Amino acid sequence: MEGESPRMFRVRIPSDAQRFGVVAVSLCQLVTKAAIKLKLAERSVGPLRVCLEEDGTEVVDEEYFSVLDRNTCLVILKRNERWTGVGVHAVSHAMVHFERCTRDVLEIFRKDPNGKYRNILKNFLNSIEDCSERESRQDDPKWFEGVDNRFKHKREEMRYRCKTRMRGYLSDAVAYKKKVPLEHQKRYEELLQLLRNELKTECFNEDYFDRSAAVVVRLCDNNGQFSCQGAYNKQDCQYQHKINPYANWESRIQFSVWNLDHRIEKSREVLPSLKTALEKSNGRQINWRYFYGLLFTRENLKLVDIVCHDKTCHKLKCKKLKFYMQ
């Protein structure tokens, strides 16, 4: 791309953790070079896709590619391959197992009238250092292990984590274009641009994870503690899950498997409804702000522990009366 300087990236395939260096100025160039480096060009593999090794977010356009950090590790996928993020499956499995163990422990506590086991647990929890009052890389270097060097404060990394999730939702909306009939794709592109511009204006809603942000915006308290908001169809969390990713490295990693869950599902309902709105618009203007709220804001997002993340089909539907401008 004209005006862009070459950047180094690391590429790999899902089945092999070995990484290779590739220098590229554009997404298109990266795919071409990666295919050669990974010997995918020698096979008839069809179109290739690119996603972040860290969390599986797909890099679908040049705009997203342009903001990736140097040395970002990317996974190159063939047509039917998937990548959910390095370690995510393992961590998710561990967390579900941990929840089962927690229930067993609670049953033991219920039968522990003298508090013997409670004291044992209390002593163990006290042995894990809580460094939530520390904010800078200098004050809490362990917390920043694995964090990009450009981030000097915890809030910067947490804001970036939220931004990455929002970019992922935008990427999903961009990828959905292929399901839109050809005659409506131009208008769909225009709507995507409106969504993209609004997301940039709102700084990708990074304040959601920033403990220094305004109380009415952030999802945590002053100390950085987040509370699970419960499954999509519940008022709150029946297990009272809480986590403070600002406290220590372990909690920061564990927080990566907490979900910003779309109550009205993004892929099953919101994006298909946007497609339907386009197809049946008959010249009417699409109420893009309604769809923006469903895709990117707390209006439709709930922060949930992995145990409370209901992956079955949600029963909530978009409101057709809000599809078009009044």
Image (cartoon, rainbow, N blue to C red):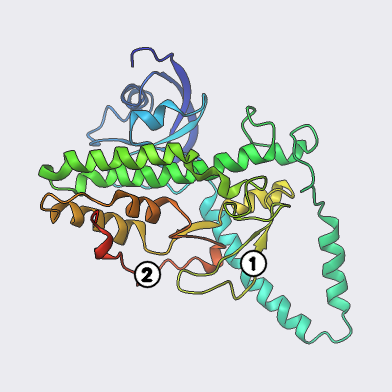
User: Does residue 302 show up?
Assistant: yes
User: Does residue 14 show up?
Assistant: no
Residue nearest the viewer, comparing 245 with 146: 245
Real-space CA distance between mark 2 and mark 1, rounded to the nearest whole angstrom: 21 Å
Q: Contact (CB < 8 A) between labels 2 and 1?
A: no
Mark 2: which secondary structure? loop
The residue located at (51%, 27%) in the rendering is 69
Q: Is residue 112 above or below residue 19?
A: below
Which residue type does callout 1 highlight?
A: His
First reached walking from the N terminus: tag 2 or tag 1? 1
The residue located at (32%, 56%) in the rendering is 267
Q: Quadrant of residue 59?
A: top left
Which residue type does callout 2 highlight?
A: His
On residue 198, the disc is: none
Residue nearest the viewer, comparing 191 with 249: 191
* Residue occupied by mark 2: 314
* Residue occupied by mark 1: 241
Q: Position of residue 127 (x, y in %)?
A: 85, 56
| Image quadrant in which the N terminus is located | top left
Crowding at label 1, few (<14), some or many (≥20) Cα neighbours within 10 Å? Answer: some
Q: Is residue 167 above or below residue 138?
A: below
Q: Position of residue 50 (x, y in %)?
A: 37, 36
